[in-house]
Amino acid sequence: MATEVVMPKLGATMEEGTIISWLVQVGEVVEEGDAIAEVQTDKIVLEIEAETTGVLLKTLYDEGSIVKVQEVVAYLGDEGERVEGLENKSSGDESQPIVAQNQTFGKVAAVLEAPAERGNKIRRTPAARKLAEENQIDLRNITGTGPLGCIQKIDVVNFLAENAKKITPLAKKIADDHGIDYKNIAGSGLNGKIVKADLDSSNSINEKVEIQKSTPSEKRIPFKGIRKVIADRMSQSAFTAPHVTLTSQVDMTNSVRLREELLPVIEKVNGYRLSYNEVILKATAHALQNHPDINVSLEKDEIVYRSNVNVGMAVAVPNGLVVPVIKNAEKLGLAAITEECKSMGKLARDGKLLPEQMQNGTFTISNLGMYAVDGFTPIINQPESAILGVGRIQEKPVAVNGELAIRSMMTLSLSFDHRIIDGAPAAAFLTELKETLENPFRLII
């Protein structure tokens, strides 16, 4: 019986997902837990994993197709098994029905045949293939222990352990540093162990250095996955929403003092250290509550005024960024916001955020204060209508009450969608945010 692979429902509000790429080709063997495809939903890219071991018999959608949750996207089964009565669905024909004979929930009837001749093709799982390629192993030298002789990852691991080349630690370090393949070098040490002199006599080091000098270093990676999703979102926002950016210098001296006083208090309560990010987020939520004309979205021909203040914070992850959302931030104290931000940030960096943790944001903060950046023009995270860019805090000489003083200054950059937010309301919001950060003790009243 062939097993259905369905578009998973990865969150309570998820209704559809986009197949970014197939990681396995039809006819390849996958083990339970192997990634089959990359799926994007609401600014996050996740993987569909195989729930059973088998051969990928058929894929029903092309890369780039939008698929509703719980729809069948592929079939796993035994080699040579055929899935009858199915029509391929292309990305341009989302309404075409999938028709299967004797279809049941989670399974589909199929005609079983004897395994087809595979010629010289080697049966192996994607994990086994990847490990073999990394270690330059010919899979024809390995006997598979999986179904029908399929080579699994454990088979490659065992092969590596049995055929490990004996080499001294010093020689191995030199070989690794210079990228030398020492598998074919004869060792002159005890019991054939490779020593440093064997690497020198083989001229492998000199040859490698010459190759590095003559070969231009150029790295190319596919433009897909989360990087492609971010690019599409940014392009859509930049070219559909007319951006206007307002900047303001904020005296953060009192906020610096507030953080220093609350740091040990909050850390004692929940074990998390209060950062300027949480202070700014709390002040932003406070200002948004008083300026509902900034906490809006444009949906078709309607301007939607959001009843809750859900503030997203941009978090850098490998190959891009994600925006976890702090829900109802206007109702949370600094201790609760600190705990939420720290836990959400860790989930983001570990790649464990759920889709619902990045949905329903009404405003976003992008903080580059940890870098040598004073100000920038952030791009709106649609369907929101405004985003706040935060620069570094830097001590500068400024005039205070007619006298020169050293103060902790920071630049805020507010980008907003000029289709639905005018300059005056945006300036009023930014002014209140500035005043709140300069007098932050009102946040704890």
Image (cartoon, grey):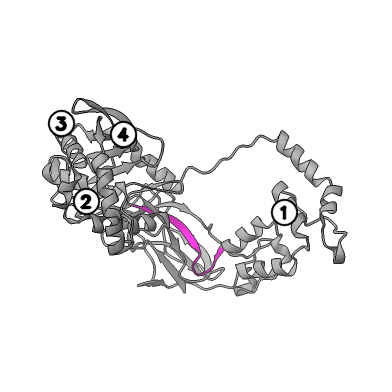
Name the kind of residue labelled 4 in the image.
Ala
Name the kind of residue labelled 1 in the image.
Lys
Name the kind of residue labelled 3 in the image.
Asp
> Where is residue 383 drawn, in percent x and y?
24, 43
Q: Are marks 4 and 1 in contact (CB under 8 Å)?
A: no
Q: Earlier in the sequence, mark 3 or mark 4?
A: 4
Query: Which residues make up the magenta segment?
Result: 29-41
* In the rendered image, the vertical position of residue 262 relative to residue 256, given as above or below: below
Disc 3 vs disc 1: which is toward the camera? 1
* In the rendered image, the vertical position of residue 256 relative to residue 421, given as above or below: below
> Where is residue 434 drawn, in percent x and y?
20, 37
> Where is residue 397 drawn, in percent x and y?
30, 28
Q: CA distance from mark 4 to mark 2?
A: 22 Å
Q: CA distance from mark 3 to mark 1?
A: 63 Å
Q: Earlier in the sequence, mark 2 or mark 1?
A: 1
- 157 left or right of 276? right
Q: Earlier in the sequence, mark 3 or mark 1?
A: 1
Q: Are marks 2 and 3 in contact (CB under 8 Å)?
A: no
Residue at label 4?
Answer: 238
Disc 2 vs disc 1: which is toward the camera? 1
Whether residue 297 is visible: no
- 286 left or right of 120? left
Q: CA distance from mark 2 to mark 1?
A: 52 Å
Q: Earlier in the sequence, mark 4 or mark 1?
A: 1
Residue at label 3?
Answer: 422
